[in-house]
Image: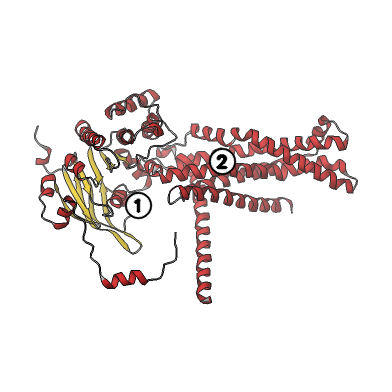
Amino acid sequence: MAAQTLSRMVSRVSRDMLRGVSDFGYLIALLGESFYWPVFGPRRKQPVRIEAVFTQMMQIGVEAIPILAVLTMAVGIMLAIQLVNTLELFGVESQVVLAVAKAMTREFGALMTAILLAGRSGSALAARIGSMVVSQEIEALRVMGIDPVRYLVVPAVIAFAIMTPALVVLADAMGIIGGGLFSTGPLNMTMETYIRTSIEVLTVGDVMQGLSKGLVFGILIALVGCSAGFSVRGGAEGVGRATTRAVVLSLTYVIIVDMMFTWFMNV
Amino acid sequence: MPKKTAQPAEHVLEVEDLVVEYGRRRILDGISMNVRAGEIMVIMGGSGSGKSTLLRHLLGLEVPAGGTVRMLGRDVSEMTNTEMDDLRQHVGVSFQSGALFTSMSVGENVALPLRERQNLDDNTIRIMTRLKLELVSLAGFENLMPSQLSGGMIKRAAFARAIVMDPKLVFFDEPSAGLDPVVSAELDELIIKLRDALGTTIIVVTHELESAFRIADRITVLDHGRVLVTDTVDAVRNCQDQRVQDLLNRTPREMEIDADDYLRRLTEEEPEYVD
């Protein structure tokens, strides 16, 4: 009995691993196609439509601005509160400006943007493509000779690649302003001085670290969302599962990649 | 004008010995058939006869285990993706559910193949779209969304999208399924009208006898993954094959039960769930 249970467990684990590997392979294939279509699409009379990219950019980027601004400002305030309290112990609370600015630009700006986009746009992408699979719309595209990856995935990937770094810039700025809202009081500083000091302490490297992370996170979220959508089987329930999967998987990938990035750029 | 059928007719679609297996189950077992230019061929069969699977293979959406499908003179399995995409500009498909893009209006749906695959200006696209909508009696509905259409209108919009590129070959999957008799008769009329007006070769997959007899030039009857008969409407009506007659007379199938097999099915352990 125990042997049977064990063998079942082993077979389940190995099947899950196999699935994980094949999912990852599919992501890589999608990434490859995302580079292929913009270059070779026109030659195959299937160009990537710039309008489709702009539509996606509006949905992914511009419409996310208000909520992202609120979220990152809140993170900035929280960071400032914690840092003022902690650095006070060492008598260096004046370093809060530096700490908030570096933490936001290197880490939290990109991370918060990725979390918001995964929940907001990655899941939407999975749901949209998933319901198109269910209602045979993907097959309809294929029999029209319209490549679904070219038509649906590539515009989303390009839009994510452009808009995520742009949103990271906004996230950085709002985080720093949020930090200033709290710490100008304890530090006895005007907002203007706070922001000027922040800009002075920041290096190009700090900002670039966040931006490059943003670029990678954005592409990851788009690819995971699309691949989850294409993998939908079995009606509405499948769409729901794919949406959840898109969010969980993309957040997992984002955080692991973030850790690796931070390791290689700072250690 | 001399009748075209007097000469050896050109085959638009040739299927030879097509075999499809899902796991251990053989879904299609050596299907061979051909479709002549300009005819309406109805592929008929009950549920589970393999007609939907056959359609998916005719469309090149799946790769068969064996056999060949030649569409417009080209072997589907030997074509590159680019060649296939180009060939598909000459093939239209109207899906059972319509498969209209829910995020686009009716007009945008019909215009999509033109917009994506042809280098045309907006005016030309609009005129060609309206022409096809006129043909399916949906003029004036181009700005509605698919969710605002009735079942029959969705099918007609899907027809319009299938023929917007003036294809040589059009597939209709269950054109009259789930519609009331009047609307379904109208759709049958429309299919005949499309063939007469555009000279298109049409392949209809259906399980509706009445509709099949009304529109078909020839009928292929499918059962358990095999072709029972391919012939003209009258010949199929008079076919002596017992299974064909059962289908035509709507006789319930007699289930043959093998005692050993039955016991095995009851007692066998549940296979582990594999998705």
Residue B177 in the image, given as x and y percentages of width and height: 28, 42
Q: Of tags 1 and 2, which is closer to the observer?
A: 2
| Left or right position of A30 against B222 | right
Q: Quadrant of the C terminus of chain B?
A: bottom left
Residue highlighted by disc 2: A121
Q: Name the one closer to the observer, A158 or A82.
A: A82
**Local crowd at mark 1 within 10 Å, few (<14), some, or many (≥20)?**
some
Find numbered disc 2 in the image and state the secondary structure of the residue it sits on.
Answer: helix
**Residue at point 49% right, 57% down?**
A22
Amino acid under label 2? Ser
Tell me: residue B126, above or below residue A259. Answer: above
What is the quadrant of residue A105 in the picture? top right
Q: Quadrant of the N terminus of chain B?
A: top left
Find numbered disc 1 in the image and state the secondary structure of the residue it sits on.
Answer: loop
Query: Would residue B5 be visible to someone looking at this image?
Result: yes
Residue A94 in the image, given as x and y percentages of width and height: 87, 41
Q: Name the one closer to the observer, B87 or A249.
A: A249
How is the structure coloured here? secondary structure
Picture mark count: 2
Q: Measure the alpha-carbon separation of dots 1 and 2.
A: 31 Å
- Mark 1 touching mark 2, by CB under 8 A? no
Residue highlighted by disc 1: B62
Any mark on residue B252, and which? none
Amino acid under label 1? Glu
| Left or right position of A69 against B48 | right
Query: Would residue A205 be visible to someone looking at this image?
Result: no
Q: Do callouts 1 and 2 point to residues on the same chain?
A: no
Residue A133 in the image, given as x and y percentages of width and height: 42, 46
Q: Dot 2 falls on which chain?
A: A
Residue B188 in the image, given as x and y percentages of width and height: 22, 37
